[in-house]
Image: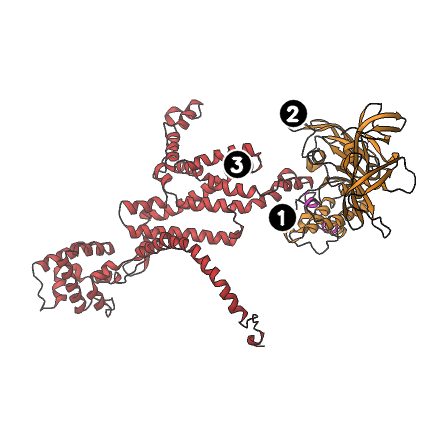
Amino acid sequence: MSKNPEFVKFDKVDKSYDGKVLVVKDLQLDIAEGEFITMLGPSGSGKTTCLMMLAGFETPTNGEILLDGNIISNIPPHKRGIGMVFQNYALFPHMTVYENLAFPLRVRKMEKDEIDKKVDKALSMVSLNGFETRMPGQLSGGQQQRVAVARALVFDPAVVLMDEPLGALDKNLRESMQYEIKHIHESIGVTVVYVTHDQSEALTMSNRIAVFNDGKVQQLSNPAELYEKPVNSFVAEFIGENNTFNGEVAEISGDECKVKLSNAEILANAISVKSKGEKTTVSLRPERALIEPSEKMDNMFSGKIEEVIYHGDHTRVRINLLGNPEFILKVPNSTSNLELKVKQDIKIGWNSSDARALDPK
Amino acid sequence: MSSETKQILTTDGIPLEVSLKKAEKKNKIKAFLLVAPLLLFLFITYVFPIGEMFTRSVDDKMITNMLPKTFKAMEKWDGKELPPEDVFAGFYSDYKVLIENQTQGKLGQRLNKEKNGFNSITKKLMRQIKRNKIDESQSIKEQIMKVHKRWRDVEYWQAIKRTAPPYTMVKYLKGVDMYFAADGSIAQVDEDRRIHRILWLRTLEIALFVTIFCFLMGYPIAHLLATLPMKYSNLLMICVLLPFWTSLLVRTASWMILLQQQGVVNDFFVMIGLVADDSRPEMMYNKVGTYVAMTQILLPFMVLPLYSVMKTISPSLMRAGKSLGGTPFVAFWKVYFPLTIPGIGAGCLLVFILAIGYYITPALVGGASGTLISNQIAYHMKTTLDWSFASAMGLMLLSGVLVIYWIYNKLVGVDNIKLG
């Protein structure tokens, strides 16, 4: 069975609530069948609005949304056949777990035997067999969350939407649920559109991530590319930790460029700078800079340690480097670790290919 | 396995329970003192008046106090034939005391209520006594029997005996159009005089329909209030509360202006040609007026509990219902509606209980066919001054409300009520 690469398609979608401000601007997004795609962004970036438009609770102000080639903008939510997991689970508090799961099947007028079978299957998928007669209020947060996932999947929808489903759980539970949802997705191959503002959640779960800001998709790519090769400084800043230098392009030749800072010049990978004299922000991941590198690197500078924070598996070192007092380094902890002391002067080096000259902040 | 061996001691060797009680005692006293003013207030303003009302409603001591010797003598009388000499003698001496105190008239009136014809024969006896026609050395029985033939009728003596107990249920029976017949059995009054039963039924009917109308009108309003954005819902809330803050009398009076035959509503009907000018419908001084005015006045009591419940229902529940494939109606009926039942229960109970005892509005716009039991109670309080009857009916109303509350508790469960 060939997978449809445009199973869900946002075609030039705009959305405005008040006719003055666009919450979503010219959204162009294709989601492949069976894909796990995450909409990631800060609050107010338009990601939840996109999800609500797909679910049918909001109508696009302009443009069309297509599901499997059919325009769905005018189809009411209950006819779209899209499962949804809500932020606060939205389990029906007056119904048992069984009744909650049977609800979408009953409204589809299924036979009792079939309903029983499907509910049983969905509950075993989230390992909650035996909880049929419990009320949602008698379940823990994690269990409620699983029931909500099972309910969204029990009627075999083509697409499942998840609106920050793990937001209310504590850290450990959230991590184990992330894997659980990922495994469910892998085993049944349903298309999942997931909304979150938690970047680590997005990175661990998704096939592709769409980073939203200001109503626009800033970057759409797989997690590794998103982290390693952010295309602009918003994405670089939003995903993971990031050291930045603001400067001006002094020289540019192909992919390489030389950026002039206030007191030095550094070499960087030219990503979104085109010409000499342009303002730019150079972005560098903390783990790509090394202390006292043994081999030759094309950026080598000396800085002063401002703060050393022990983190168990690694140590974070804050260094005042090239006029940036917030330069962070991550040093893995090992027996042969360097003795790092505050106020110590050290040498820092990194490769120009890891430093990305992006749009100015 | 005695509890002695298991008793836990504190480190100082005092039994733990004793120690705990001692430690908690201060808190308990403090808590009691905090609620004491409320308890006192409740006692003075609620328990005491209702107790007083109950006593008054069953009190029949007046006649018991007036005829002590008579009733003492009557204890041995079987009540089948004319009483023996000592009963007559007792009655004679009691009555003489009353004449001296000039309170004999009250006895006559009271006995006349028990059986017609007493007033005249007691007066006749009084005149005989005043003229010293009764010779105390002779048989009192013979002499009294000569005063009037009715004194020879055993039924009249039976009637006196019936008034002997200091307590009576007669007012309660009267409240449901019944009375004690001559032989002491309970009988119904003549069909054309059964006014109270009609009033009770009408009160129930009007309270029921007002509750239904309030529910039908209040549910959508409460839903709108709970789902609209804050700035609109605040405005709407004021629209709901504004009449609530307006004087009841003013609101009822304005309904009178609207509903009367030459009133605004009728004028409008005539203007749009709905009714002819000479056949304007009567919308006031009947049930219609009572329904309209009471529904409007009691509406906030339905809206507010409903609103407070609906406010807590997450909008995502309806969305979940729809996204799972339920039509908007199914999502409403299966998801939203069941969650509002606590509010419906509270609102309906509140409106029904208020409506069942409503007074001013039916009194002003109800006319003859729209008055309720409370108007009858007020009538006996103010006009006939039969306070014991008014008390009896008030208590019957109260127990009716308690019965409804009990039924409601069995059906819905009082724990499910949410008033906000």
Amino acid, disc 1: Pro
Which region is colored magenta?
Answer: A103-117
Q: Would residue A346 be found to the left or right of residue A120 on screen?
A: right
Which label number is shown at residue A93?
1
Magenta stretch, main secondary structure class: helix
Q: Residue at x 66, y 49 (%)?
A: A99
The answer to the question of whether label 2 and label 3 lie on touching residues, with beta carbons closer than 8 A, is no
- Image quadrant holding the C terminus of chain A, namely top right
Report the chain holding disc 2.
A
Badge 2 density bin: few <14, some 14–19, many ≥20, Cα 10 Å: few
Q: Are discs 3 and 1 located on one and the same chain?
A: no
The shade of chain B is red
Gap in angstroms between the C-alphas marked 1 and 2: 38 Å
Q: Would residue B40 be found to the left or right of residue A297 on screen?
A: left
Amino acid, disc 2: Lys
Disc 2 secondary structure class: loop
Q: Residue at x 50, y 53 (%)?
A: B409
Which label number is shown at residue B36?
none
Picture quadrant where residue B7 is located: bottom right
The residue labelled by disc 2 is A20
The residue labelled by disc 3 is B221
Badge 3 density bin: few <14, some 14–19, many ≥20, Cα 10 Å: many
Judging depth in this view, the residue of B388 and A175 nearest the camera is A175
Q: Which chain is orange?
A: A
Gap in angstroms between the C-alphas marked 3 and 1: 24 Å
